[in-house]
Image: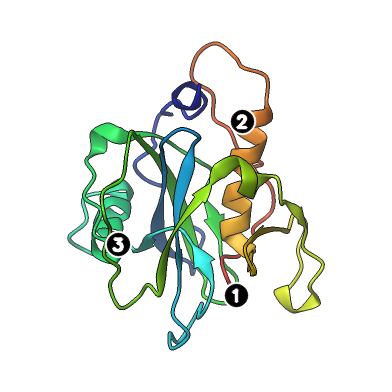
Amino acid sequence: MLRAAFAATSGATDLLGTDAGYSRAAVLVVVYGNPPTIIMTLKPPYLRVHAGEISFPGGSVESSDTDMLHTALRETREEIGLHLGRDVVVGSLNAVTTQSTEFVIMPFVAIVDDIPDLRPNREVERILRIPLAELLDTMAADTDPQHNAVMGMYTFRHENNIVWGATARILKQIRDMLSAPRRAGPVIYGDGGPKGHLED
């Protein structure tokens, strides 16, 4: 069911266009196990930006990357020590943007049976294995005035941590997609709404 919902879409390995002034980045949503569990990371408090925030493994496009899927897989390997190939990537979601750091981010989705022991690098405080359904059930409107509120802002909660911004907008796309009626053939899912932000 998850594989069908995350059916690969055409043009999934790159952005067709990038907003002027925005840098490109990619993240990987890794889903595994039964019940489905996702991998997320808690950023350490000493980072210059996004300190202490929960996000998906990923990062900026480098000149040596062949496309944005390459970026997502490379950054996942570097940040949490998880080596995945393109064959386990089943699709992508709509790109989201950050405001304060001005990134446009392409989220890719990988589904695997199991995850080995992982090793975080210095950019990751903790690796989180979170039951997907439980996390999606915590969705609420983001009413924090410090989050530069724009239309379509949401929060999710894991333990004592709040997930918000662009990461929450990615989770909102997943929630909408999994609750949508099943359709025949590949479908591009996502809210397609106004720009959000990651952990501004």
Closest to the camera, between mark 3 and mark 2, is 3
Q: Is residue 40 above or below residue 86?
A: below
| Position of residue 13 measured from the top left corner of the image (x, y, whole percent) | 34, 41
Residue 200 appears in the picture as rendered: yes
Mark 1 residue crowding within 10 angstroms, few (<14) / some (14–19) / many (20+) = some
| Position of residue 124 measured from the top left corner of the image (x, y, whole percent) | 37, 72
Q: Circle 2 is placed at which residue position?
A: 178
Q: Any mark on residue 80, and which?
A: 3
Label count reads 3
Q: Circle 1 is placed at which residue position?
A: 200
Q: Is residue 147 above or below residue 139?
A: below
Task: Give the CA separation, mark 3 to mark 1.
Answer: 22 Å
* Amino acid at the residue labelled 3: Ile
Return the disc, 3 or 2, that comes first in the chain's sequence.
3
In the image, farthest residue toward the top: 184
Write the residue at 63% across / 53% down.
Answer: 169
Residue 17 appears in the picture as rendered: no
* Amino acid at the residue labelled 2: Leu
Return the disc, 1 or 2, that comes first in the chain's sequence.
2
| Position of residue 87 measured from the top left corner of the image (x, y, whole percent) | 25, 32
Front residue of this view, candidates 139 and 196: 139
Residue 199 in which image quadrant? bottom right
Task: Give the CA separation, mark 3 to mark 2.
Answer: 26 Å
Left or right: residue 151 compared with residue 191: right
Left or right: residue 89 compared with residue 98: left
The quarter of the rendered structure image containing the C terminus is bottom right
